[in-house]
Every structure is written in structure tokens, then in C-alpha cells.
Image (cartoon, helix red, strand yellow):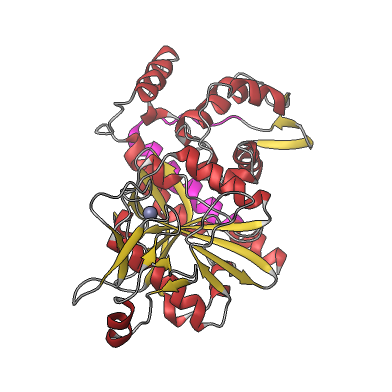
């Protein structure tokens, strides 16, 4: 591992960030030790490499080969600099003995401690969650930033993603939208995928980039400007893909879903437009929206006559087999949030009404389109209707 910090013979930590050539040359005369394994390390610096400490060939340091290379060190160093320039107290690789964790950066801001983890390599999801819990227990607010080398763009509102990346969906305050952060230390660009909505290996959301050094830490906590109508616009394409004959239903859960639909004489082409709608916290559920929303609509709502009611716990038992994702944001949120959001969406569409907190009444039948063309038209109408409803709500709030 490229070390940015080592200790000298007196145990004083020495950072190589910001050192001049002469200072580096002077430091090379001294002896340094790895703060983790206490082995002797040496300074590596040159035209192309950022100055760092390295272990000797025969080293047995457990952290020597953890896969984090030069890109990771550069990012850590750049983030460290960024906090320092703002006058925010920051420590690099500070060992928190109470929880035995060493965050990349420990920051003190507005009387709060923040652990900044810059993650470029894949590690076990369990480690990610345990570290996050460790920080929370110690009263430290964790912020995970992925290396931008992990960001695979597919247009302006879609990225290709892995299960690992989707774990990093975070919410910094109850008011801010969920997001995933990516940082590129070469271009100094921070990119946020705001309001991410994962469907298998794709993730929709609004991609928003800014030059890190042009803004302060408070930028992380701004209420983001993503409006649902922006989401509805790209969701129409997703609906077309879902209904298309060329859609691939290859995975085992998709195959089970398709044969379950066949057993009811149905196909994705002819499902009501109210199935497969975006809800803000869908990312808490790994099962695709079209599967869990079909369960609710076809198993609970469709068999009911208009005017009859159902309870929320019936929905829960129908959804027992869905897969939960548990991203970082799930530390404060439960997957039921997404299910409730969907029921409220159906309420806004006047399919349901709420009798009380846990009881819903069916208000009208949903339409099963007879042709693909009709289905796509209805999808478009329904998403437009949601845009209008959202604009009205916002006017009322203002
Ligand atoms: Zn070491």
C-alpha cells in the first residue's frame, strides 16, 4: 500500500503531502516506520509518482497488498488538501483505538466528527457495513466516496453498476436525497448520482459533477435539486425497455416472474401502467420494481372489488420473498419505506384511498392494455399525470 503517513524515530507522524523536492531529499536521510506494522519504510518520489512511503520487498505488513494503489493515495491526498485549505481540522489515517478503525480522513466540522473513506477497490460488503456501524457507534459520521474509476456512465442519467457500488447509496441528512459520490483526483471532479434507482446492472439517477476545490464541505449537505419529473422523463424509456419484446429476462428471478405472469395469462407487455413505477427509496429493495409492484397489484389489489379494503400487513406477507439490498442508507431506513411510497403513489393516482394509517381502500380498477402500443401510450400518460400532480403539490407547499 502506498502510505501517505509514516512515523519518524520519535514516533512523530510525518506527511509527505506538500513537501518540496529539497524537503523530500532531506527527509530521505531519515528513518521512517509504518504506523500499522512498525516495519521500516522508505520514501518513493519522482516525476510521475506522488511522494509516498513504501514497504520493502520482504515486508509482511498486512496492509501491504490491499489493492489500493496510486489513484487511491492521490485521492486521499487531494481530499486532505481540500479540507486543510478550508481551515477544517483534518487527520490522515488517524487510528481510533476505541473502535480499532483507521479512516482515510478524520474531519472535525461544525462540532461533528466525520470519517471520510475513499474507496477505489472492491472490499467485502460486510466490512463496509461494519466500518460504517463502528463509526456511528463512536458518534462519528461516515462519508464514503468511491473512486471515479468505478463510475461507468451510460448517458446523462444512467450508469452501469455492480452490487458493490449500489451499497454506497447514502443519505447525509433526512432532508437530502440519497446519493452515491465518486471522486477523480486527476481532474478534481466530484460526481454525485442523486436519487439513484437501481435495476439489475443499471442505475438511474441524476448525474451531477462539480470541481471539488471550487466548493466547500457544506456543498455535501445542500438539498439537491432533483425533481421527480426529471425522473419520470427517463423512466418512460425504462418502461419501454421493460415492455419490449427484446427485453432480456435471463436471470432466475426474472424467469420465475415471467412464468408466474404466464400462469395468470399475462406478459410484461400487457401489464397495467401502474406497475414498474419509480419510488424514491426503491434502492432499499434489490428485487426489481416490476416484480414487487406486480405482486402488490396482481395479488392484493386486482382480486379486490372496488370499495373493499386491505391492510398493510397483507402487503408485507405478499412481499416476504423479496430481496433486501441493505446499502449504507439502510442503517437509518427500512425497506418498508419504499413499499409505503408505492401505496401512496397509487393513492395519488386514485387507485387507492387511505382509510387510516394501515388500511387502504380500492377506488377503481386498473386497466390491462390490449396492445403494446396502447400500453406505451398509457405509460406516457400516467407519467405525465405524475409530473402534473407533483407540480401541484409543490405549488401547494409554497
Ligand atoms: Zn506496514
Rendered-image quarter of ligand 1: bottom left
Can residue 335 be seen in the rendering of this structure? Answer: yes
**222 or 277: nearer the viewer:** 222
Residue 345 lies, in percent from the top left, at: 61, 43
Question: Looking at the image, can residue 156 be seen?
Answer: no
Magenta stretch: helix, strand or loop mostly = helix
The image shows residue 124, relative to residue 51, as above or below, that is above
Q: Which residues are magenta?
A: 365-389
User: Between 92 and 373, which is closer to the camera in this rendering?
Assistant: 92
Residue 9's spot in the image, x, y percent?
44, 69
Q: Position of residue 313 (x, y in %)?
A: 71, 25
- Quarter in which the C terminus is drawn: bottom right
Pick whichever, 221 or 277, lies toward us. Answer: 221
Residue for point 68% across, 56% down: 139
Identify the image quadrant of residue 1: bottom left
Q: Residue at x 71, y 65 (%)?
A: 397
Amino acid at each position: 500500500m502506498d502510505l501517505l503517513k509514516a512515523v519518524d524515530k520519535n514516533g512523530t507522524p510525518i506527511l509527505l503531502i506538500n513537501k518540496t523536492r529539497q524537503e523530500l531529499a532531506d527527509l530521505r536521510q531519515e528513518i521512517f516506520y509504518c504506523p500499522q506494522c512498525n516495519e521500516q519504510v522508505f520514501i518513493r518520489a519522482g516525476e510521475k509518482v506522488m511522494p509516498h512511503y513504501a514497504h520493502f520487498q520482504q515486508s509482511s505488513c498486512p496492509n501491504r497488498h490491499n489493492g489500493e494503489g496510486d489513484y487511491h493515495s492521490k485521492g486521499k491526498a487531494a481530499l486532505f488538501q481540500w479540507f486543510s485549505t478550508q481551515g477544517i481540522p483534518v487527520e490522515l489515517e488517524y487510528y481510533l483505538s476505541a473502535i480499532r478503525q483507521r479512516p482515510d480522513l478524520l474531519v472535525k466540522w461544525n462540532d461533528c466528527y466525520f470519517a471520510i473513506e475513499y474507496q477505489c477497490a472492491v472490499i467485502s460488503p460486510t466490512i463496509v457495513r461494519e466500518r460504517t456501524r463502528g463509526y456511528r457507534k463512536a458518534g462519528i459520521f461516515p462519508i464514503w466516496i468511491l473512486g471515479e474509476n468505478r463510475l461507468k456512465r451510460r448517458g446523462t442519467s444512467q450508469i452501469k453498476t455492480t452490487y458493490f457500488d449500489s451499497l454506497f447509496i447514502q443519505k447525509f441528512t433526512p432532508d437530502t436525497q440519497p446519493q452515491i459520490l465518486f471522486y477523480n483526483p486527476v481532474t478534481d471532479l466530484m460526481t454525485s448520482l442523486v436519487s439513484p434507482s437501481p435495476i439489475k446492472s443499471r442505475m438511474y439517477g441524476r448525474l451531477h459533477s462539480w470541481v471539488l476545490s471550487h466548493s466547500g464541505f457544506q456543498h455535501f449537505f445542500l438539498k439537491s435539486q432533483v425533481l421527480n419529473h426529471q425522473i419520470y422523463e427517463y423512466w418512460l424509456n425504462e418502461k419501454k425497455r421493460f415492455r419490449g419484446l427484446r427485453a432480456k429476462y435471463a436471470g432466475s428471478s426474472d424467469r420465475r416472474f415471467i412464468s408466474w405472469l404466464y400462469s395468470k395469462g399475462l406478459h410484461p407487455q400487457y401489464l397495467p401502467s401502474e406497475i414498474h413505477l419509480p419510488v424514491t427509496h426503491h434502492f432499499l429493495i434489490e428485487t426489481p420494481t416490476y416484480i414487487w409492484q406486480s405482486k402488490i397489484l396482481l395479488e392484493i389489489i386486482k382480486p379486490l372489488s372496488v370499495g373493499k379494503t386491505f391492510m398493510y400487513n397483507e402487503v408485507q406477507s405478499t412481499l416476504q420473498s423479496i430481496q433486501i439490498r441493505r446499502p449504507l442508507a439502510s442503517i437509518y431506513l427500512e425497506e418498508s419505506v419504499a413499499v409505503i411510497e408505492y401505496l401512496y403513489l397509487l393513492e395519488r393516482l386514485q387507485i387507492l384511498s387511505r382509510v387510516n394509517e394501515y388500511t387502504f381502500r380500492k377506488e377503481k380498477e386498473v386497466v390491462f392494455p390490449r396492445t403494446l402500443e396502447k400500453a406505451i401510450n398509457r405509460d406516457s400518460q400516467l407519467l405525465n399525470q405524475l409530473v402534473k400532480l407533483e407540480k401541484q403539490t409543490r405549488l401547494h407547499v409554497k
